Image: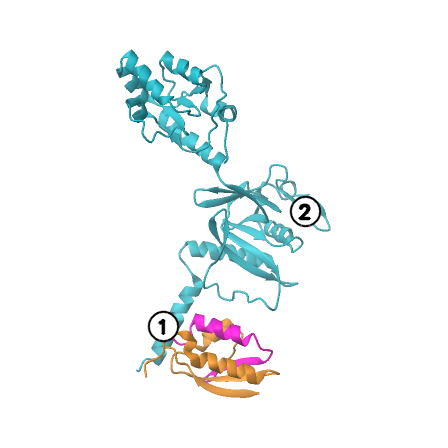
Chain colours: A orange, B cyan
Amino acid sequence: MLERIVRVRNSKGIHIRPGQEIVQTAEQFLADVFLQNGSKRINAKSMLGIMGLVAGEGTDLKIITDGPDEAEALQALADLIESGFGEELEEE
Amino acid sequence: MKSLSVRELYESKRELFQFEVLTGSIDSERPITVSDVHRPGLALAGFTKNFLAERIQILGETEMLFLETLGKEERRKAIDRLFQEKVPCVIVAKGLEYDAYLSTKAKEVGVPILRTPQSTTPFIHRLAEFLEEAFAPRTTLHGTLVDVYGAGLLITGKSGIGKSECALDLVERGHRLVTDDMVIVTRKHNLLYGEASEQLKYHMEIRGIGIVDVRSMFGVRAIGKTKRIDVEVRLREWSASVQYDRLGLEDRMTTILGLKVPVVTIPIIPGKNITVLAEVVAMNHQLKIQGIHSVDLLDKSLIEAMRKKSAPV
């Protein structure tokens, strides 16, 4: 099992469109993928779960992957979230 | 190009329009090729530029009153102008009296004249409706059309995937079958309508059982004659390599007879209840028509919730 903490950078946070990208990315791996915001932990392959995270900009999200391709899954998810999903980023 | 002979018009609509033939023959050299009709007032008056000779020419009270105001010679010239190009046919409305030269000239050039006792404008509307139907673009599709909660669902997918079984299940739940397996699609204005072929009407082929007559079995509440096509529901065997729509953020479209129709692709997995999914597709369509896009609303409220949470207190 692997973990990494990443920060949500796009100004609108993880709303539906980024959520869809997370699901589509997570689904490519055999590993289980979870996202944790505070005490809330959800399956990243579930759309409604991601929406339930309510992860706005600046949120520190923990990515947890577990399975045969956990390292690749962790990297892919971290890259995606840190890229800001191609949306407008928060102002530094 | 699609065309309709004047004889076909006369024979199919003789009773509705109470047509009488004022010329000896009903056969015209020129078929009807367009659904619009024309009132040739300006041509009679002398302005023949842009005269729409390919259309059925309708003579109403205005045209006839105008002809009456002319002297004999002028009137003949006016009538000659009407026939200078080959028109498919001339129809006199409102049972109006006509100048004998009109029928003489028409016979001479081989253009039939019909007369209806009906008022000009209502007659034109009805005639245009009939012509539009006759000239409407048509195609035949492989699929099943069911009226589900008022939405016309065109269920498509390859043979054996379960279109008929899905339709049967929908009928069982109180929805209406329009046609199974073959849909005759007609485009009218900007809408598509589907119906059954006259012979196959309300029959279904269910694998393992055979041909079933839905009307006899379920009664009239289970059938519909024609239905507007609102959504195509595509049944596909489930494949791990295909990404299915999880959100419905954008409407995916297909094109039928040049019109865009939203498509919902449903992966088929044994044990999955497609019927309930089809009902949800129909209800979701009706909600969208009411202006309620569930996913957009959810997105807005989510962004709002995140904005509040991150705003400094």
What x and y, as percent, mark residue B172? 61, 50
- Which residue sits furthest right? B208
Residue nearest the viewer, comparing B93 with B89? B89
Q: Within the magenta stretch, is there residue B57?
A: no
Image quadrant in which you'd find residue B82 = top left
Where is B250 relative to B77, above or below? below
- Residue B34, given in percent of the width and then of the height, sits at 44, 33
Can residue B22 be seen at all in this image of the molecule?
no
Q: Which residue is mark 1?
A: B304
**Identity of the residue drawn at 48% across and 82% down:** A78
Q: Residues within 10 Å of mark 1 (few under 14, many from 20)?
A: some
| Residue B300 drawn above or below residue B200 | below
Q: Which mark is residue B173?
A: none
Quadrant where the C terminus of chain B lies? Answer: bottom left
| Residue nearest the observer in this picture, B132 or B228 | B132
Point out the tag, 2 or 1, that comes first from the N-terminus.
2
Tell me the subunit letter for badge 1. B
Q: Where A33 falls versus B130 (above or below)?
A: below
Disc 1 residue type? Glu
Residue found 59% across the figure and 62% down from its top: B267
